Image: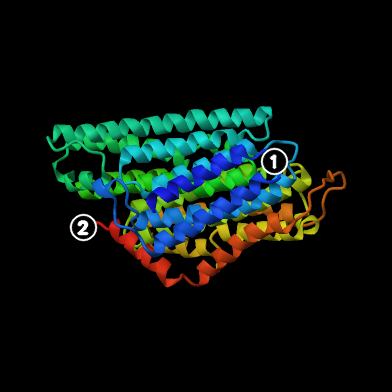
Amino acid sequence: MFAALIILPLIGAAVTWLIPYDRLRPKVLALFAFAHLGLTIQLLTVTPPESAGGWFHLDALGKIVLLSTSILFFTCALYSVGYLFYRRERSNRVLCIGLLVCLSAASLVTITHHLGLMWVALETTTISMAPLIYFNRNARSIEATWKYLLICSVGVALALIGLYFLAYATIVAQVEPSLLLDDLMRDAGKLSSGWVHAAFVFLLVGFGTKMGLAPLHTWKPDAYGEAPGLVGALLSGGLVNLAFLALVRVYQICLATKEIAFFQNALIVMGLFSMIIAAIFMARQADFKRMLAYSSVEHVGIMAVALGLGGTAIFGALFHVLANGLTKGILFLSSGNIHRSYNSKSTDHVRGALRRLPWSGGIFLAGFIAITGSPPFAPFISEFTIISSAFIQGQMLVGTVFLISLTVIFIGMALTVLPMVMGEAPADSETTSYRDSIWTVGPPLFLLLLIFLLGVWIPEPLMAILRDASALLEVRS
């Protein structure tokens, strides 16, 4: 079953490579995405035991990220059928192949407990997404692609050094050298404290770069701004969660070594700094896709703060993985429709989206309400849980900065989003051939209904997974 999760998308990539027709490839992409989602649900329902040697095991933490990734990928694959219909001037072979390779690597990240193999899978997601950022093939997209490759590769390289340090700590402790999570947690008390601290610093910086924590976020505005909407959705709602899962694995080792306070404090500082940076740069942002990039910086900061706080905030962080990932899909897909209709990302030209595109404009507006933590959507539950946990723990400064940042970000996003969707379209606005269709509106609408449902009712099977995952990250005396 674990092998099928990885091999199925690779078979899909081979099939799309062989198909000579651009119109057919997106449908094949959607078919394999649907099969992957079905396999994911089956694995969540009946989870196989861990593999021999402990290299592969789908625990509750991996289940949350795998479910979020598979749902988001399926909706983006459906969206691609309509989106690529309007992009017939470009071949979609590389796009479809890259997406499926990325899905295979993402699946591997969620099920492996070998940190070295997880690093390889994360690097594969980075490489497979790079050509997709360059889809528009202009000067700005090539610049964004190089920034993404350079900065993320440096970050992943730093994470590799952290893994080397962690492995060397086992040699110094004279225990069996291993990068298996279970082995490291078992021998954590014997590991060299100095080498472990050095490893944690490099791993935090490395995986933090992949997540886009400030000040390591500088690749995000360009990459998200120039990538197609469905690629931006997967970068912001998918790859971010994979990097967060890698940080969570480091967190588990920190718990076992009893050195958790050092790592938690670093997470809180970087998380709050990310939220402050997002609040500063989101105000009066003229490019609405770059605005969504800074929104991603904000939300990785929220997850980092929650992980640093511990306690009940852990539940909020894990639920936010799902809530933020799906909500980002709503925003990026609907913004892609608006971009296609106006042929512009500038708020100087995009006005009156509700009149020109009632469905896409309305979904984008609802997505804005959801992502800013407003009820009754799922992000409200996760953010309220995190904020209340901060104050209950007596972390008044953290809670206050958190709240102020959220308030400033809400105002900043509103100043960009509301003029976009309200009012009249400019008289000189370019008229394009784009029209909303079931393929381009249905997927983000499905995600919107899903986060609304999760905001008012969390199904018991999902709640059980969230509880089990939270228990794995509890501080034990």
Say whether residue 81 is left or right of residue 70.
Answer: right
List x then y, in percent, for residue 28: 61, 48
Choose top left, top right, bottom left or bottom right for residue 318. Answer: bottom left
Neighbourhood count class around disc 2 (C-alpha, 10 Å): few under 14, some 14–19, many 20 upward: few
Q: Position of residue 146 (x, y in %)?
A: 56, 28
3D distance between C-alphas at marks 2 and 1 = 57 Å
* Residue depth check, mark 2 versus mark 1: number of the one nearer the observer: 1
Residue 199's disc is: none
Identify whether 219 is placed above or below 245: above
Q: Residue at x 64, y 50 (%)?
A: 27
Tell me the number on the disc at residue 476: 2
- In the picture, measured across the screen, residue 438 lies left or right of residue 408, that is right
Visible in this render: residue 136?
A: yes
Residue at the left extreme? Answer: 174
Rendered residue at 26%/39% (across/down): 179
Residue ID at (73%, 53%): 419
Mark with earlier residue (2, 1):
1
* Picture mark count: 2
Q: Are marks 2 and 1 in contact (CB under 8 Å)?
A: no
Q: Which residue position is annotated with label 1?
A: 21
Quadrant of res 135: top right
User: How is colour applied across the structure in the image?
Assistant: rainbow
Quadrant of the drawing holding the C terminus: bottom left
